[in-house]
Amino acid sequence: MRYRTLGRSGAVVSTQALGTMTFGAECDEETSGELLAAFVERGGTLVDTADVYSGGVSEEIVGRWLAKHPSEAGQLVVATKARFPMGEGPNDLGLSRRHLRTALEDSLRRLGVEHIDLYQMHAWDELTPLEETLRFLDDAVTAGKIGYYGFSNYLGWQVTKAVHIAAAQGWAAPVTVQPQYNLLVRDIEHEVVPACLDAGIGLLPWSPLGGGWLTGKYERDIPPSGPTRLGDNPERGMEAWAARNADKRTWQVVDAVRDVAREAGIRESQVALAWVAAQPAVTSVILGARTVEQLLDNMGAADLDLDEEGLARLTEASSPRVDDYPYGTAGRDQRHRSLTGGR
């Protein structure tokens, strides 16, 4: 296992993180404990959960495991999130001081800890002033209830605005952003990645395997059968499957992953994970698994370096299809003219 700092902070985490969205849903407590044990045994240190995962059950499972394994728990960096509804009241959601105070206390209780290492805002809240959210987070850092904070599913301008407000007020700065990022979904490279690089913020990509599309289990025009990441009913998510199956770019990427994997003698999932881990600003790649076998398979990419040719082939095959100003050809031409003194 390799390690990197958590964004611009001094905290060090493994370059692979264990995502626990399956805990209490696809994974019962026994299986969840086996996943945690296998992850830690192989050097993993960053565990990511959220209050909304299984309605709080995921945090509870993680908390009970931490209590039973104090020596291992002392080496872990525990991350959780808040934003989405945990009740039916008008203040049981969002990023207001009112909701975050309750959400943080509830997460601390479910996890059985006095301090959360990384507290993440699960999504943007258009109703709450950003200053209110950031002031609460700074207060939580000062009070010792959280070590660092970050965002999930934020846009580039939202990240940059938060960074500048925190700096202007002298408040603690965000250290991470958790976005969807994989060979099939690279749109964050337009704005989010540059914003994070500019601020020294680390990326924690979720869905690095594109919902299973980059594992080699799908074949063109053959609908999936049996359990999926959405549960035991293969009909769930079929509309999304049909749209992606019909997209020529999907198979262009999948074929490139297969070719690189075959030539390197490794699994396709490991190729996809290694590509994400090698991208700028990435701190740790979040792994989701339903079985220990799946987890260990994915952890095989932890120390994997793809050669430059393989990386280039994957990057080219998965290049985002944007041809509109300012990101496409017209935008690139205009930027070139500006740099060379033209108009």
Image (cartoon, rainbow, N blue to C red):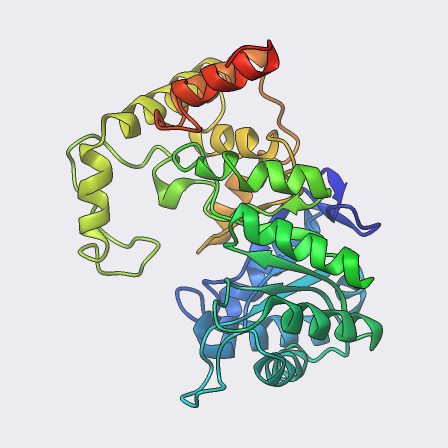
Q: How many marks?
A: 0
Q: Residue furthest bottom?
A: 89
Pick whichever, 182 or 73, lies toward us. Answer: 182
In terms of image quadrants, where is residue 105? bottom right
Residue 267 percent location from the top left of the image: 46, 29
Residue 177 percent location from the top left of the image: 60, 51
Q: Is residue 68 above or below residue 333?
A: below
Q: Is residue 145 above or below residue 210?
A: below
Residue 20 percent location from the top left of the image: 53, 61
Q: On the picture, is 323 further left or further right than 82?
A: left
Quarter of the picture holding the N terminus: top right
Q: On the picture, is 41 further left or further right than 192?
A: right
Q: Is residue 76 visible?
A: no
Identity of the residue drawn at 67% across and 42% down: 283
Q: On the picture, is 158 further left or further right than 148?
A: left
Residue 128 percent location from the top left of the image: 54, 73
Q: Is residue 85 above or below residue 25?
A: below
Q: Is residue 6 visible?
A: yes
Identity of the residue drawn at 62% across and 63% down: 120
Identity of the residue drawn at 37% across and 46% down: 211
Q: Residue furthest front?
A: 343
Pick whichever, 96 or 253, lies toward us. Answer: 96
